[in-house]
Image: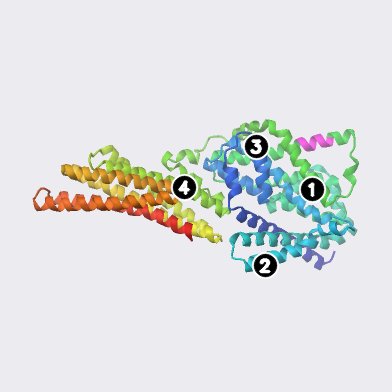
Amino acid sequence: MDLLSIFTMIGGLALFLYGMHVLGEGLAKLSGGKMEAILSKMTDSPLKGVLLGAGATAVIQSSSATTVMVVGFVNSGIMQLKQAVGIIMGANIGTTITSWILSLSGIESDNLFVKLLKPDAFSPILAMVGVILLMFCNSERKKDLGTILIGFAILMFGMDTMSSAVEPLRNIPSFTNLFVAFSNPIIGMIAGTILTAIIQSSSASVGILQALCITGAIPYSAVLPIIAGQNIGTCITALLSSIGASVNAKRAAFIHLYFNVIGTAVFMVGFYIIHYISPFDFLEQTATPAGIAVTHSFFNIFATLILLPFSYKLVTLASISVRDSQADYTKELPSRLAALSNMDERFLDNPPFALTQCKKTIGAMLVLAEESVQESVSLITGYNKKKAEHVEELENYVDQYETKINDYMFEIDLAPLPLADARELSMMQQCVGNIERVADYALSIALSAKKMEKKNLDFAKETKEDLSRYRDILLSLVRHTEEYWENPEPLIANDAFQLENELNRIEKRIIKEHKKRLKKDKYSVDTGFILSDILTGLKKVAEHSLLVMESMQTANTE
């Protein structure tokens, strides 16, 4: 094998890995975070979790991405540890779909229809279609589809290039002897583990193995231990992802490790015991891409079937391995700030899903702002020190939400986003500022009420009645904003804007009556200033609440 062939092989490997990366990114964008949203839903049995994990991984083409996402869910408290087990097991099955796709390159037949199934026949067409979609279509979904097609074409071209470059190796004894050495179960498993740990993708390492089998130098006796090792090596991604995470997130990563290690050990020990008693003839046969796909699938399905009944025992084992010696992040957070854990940094690898989690967290922030308004306006007609302190506490929480959410959205904004997601991100950035201002003005109202209490001032009966009506309508408007955030129905927004008209009418009446009382010296100057501050605060709460809905309406109509 000359130097040019080595460079060709390296170039083919680079294209293969890049194509797999582009394909995965395109699939993730096209799913729009839906696969991850489905994963986050509660699963009431390990079997359902297996099916869910297998299906999601088959769609996004990455068991590593699925397990990292699960670690993030557990870290955020979205998913319980017991629910994560089935999904982790299913991810190992779902990732085998890649090896089946790649096995198409090994099809040999004189039949025209069968030849057309070979990737080298249809990949150029897919690449051309992908380029057309990417360059000439305005639809983001069509562009994502184009990215997927181009990624697949690059992947298959890279695999063909690798296969062509390594073909001469079939005549080199040292290369053949290398894979004879890998037939030793321990050496083969170590090789598979190291390769997969380096490239952090079992699908990619299986693809490389399928490309190398074109040399005819790889027997199934070497394929089996290498694939077993690949399943252990893929755990490195989840383990790295769990660094700095909560105790339960670390346990989720260890469940993935234990599942693969125990499953591999049971399979290999059982297989070689049977082989010792009754030797398997196929082990000395030359591996094919399809044969590797079958081996990969059988190995993962076997491990899942064997360990599924003991899924909760894996949770116990992981809990023993990772003790509660350090405080859990979600437990350290005050309950009112718990929603901040939804915005896990692991989700940033999938911006559409990160946006979904961000929106949920903003919803929790809005609930706190609504509560602060409710508490503060009640102080106008009856001051209560504990309520006033609670308003200050809520405003502090809202400020913390604003800081964390803005930092998280900044990270999302660094990633290339589809136009629709970019608009939604812009909308949320505007809304967070307005929600924070709602809490600020709620605190302002509470401080004005505190001044009245301190100076022993009071409003006239009629003013109190008008302020009570204003309060009730304002609370209704803020609740409409909260409802609209969860369910942007036009009728909800229309009702809120109608309430604004009623608030303006009451405000005018309060100001008119206030001026009359000033002329008759029935109000002190201090009372007038405080009433003005309260009205300003109430008006601003209404304005910023409506601005949240206006931002959402604008984003929905663009």
Q: Using residue 236 as the reference point, say whether residue 271 is left or right of it.
A: right
Q: Using residue 462 as the reference point, say whether residue 106 is left or right of it.
A: right
> For the residues marked 1 and 4, what is the alpha-carbon distance in whole angstroms?
45 Å
Badge 4 or badge 2: first in the primary sequence: 2
Q: Identity of the amino acid at label 4? A: Asn
Q: Which residues are magenta?
A: 266-272
Q: Identity of the amino acid at label 2? A: Ile
Badge 2 or badge 1: first in the primary sequence: 2
> For the residues marked 4 and 3, what is the alpha-carbon distance in whole angstroms?
29 Å
Q: Is residue 18 visible?
A: no
Image location (x, y in percent) of residue 328: 50, 39
Rate crowding at label 3 as few (under 14), some (14 to 19) or many (20 or more) other CA atoms within 10 Å: some
Q: Tell us which disc is closer to us: 2 or 3.
A: 2
The residue carrying mark 4 is 487
The residue carrying mark 1 is 293
Residue 488, placed above or below residue 169:
above
The residue carrying mark 2 is 132
Q: Main secondary structure of the magenta part?
A: helix
> For the residues marked 3 and 1, what is the alpha-carbon distance in whole angstroms?
24 Å
Which residue is located at x 45 percent, y 49 percent? Answer: 489
> In the rendered structure, does residue 174 fall within the stretch colored magenta?
no
Rate crowding at label 2 as few (under 14), some (14 to 19) or many (20 or more) other CA atoms within 10 Å: some
> For the residues marked 4 and 2, what is the alpha-carbon distance in whole angstroms?
37 Å
Image location (x, y in percent) of residue 204: 72, 53
> In the rendered structure, does residue 269 fall within the stretch colored magenta?
yes
Q: Identity of the amino acid at label 1? A: Ala
Which element carries disc 4, helix, strand or loop?
loop
Badge 3 or badge 1: first in the primary sequence: 3
Q: Identity of the amino acid at label 3? A: Lys
The residue carrying mark 3 is 48
Q: Image quarter for residue 154?
A: bottom right
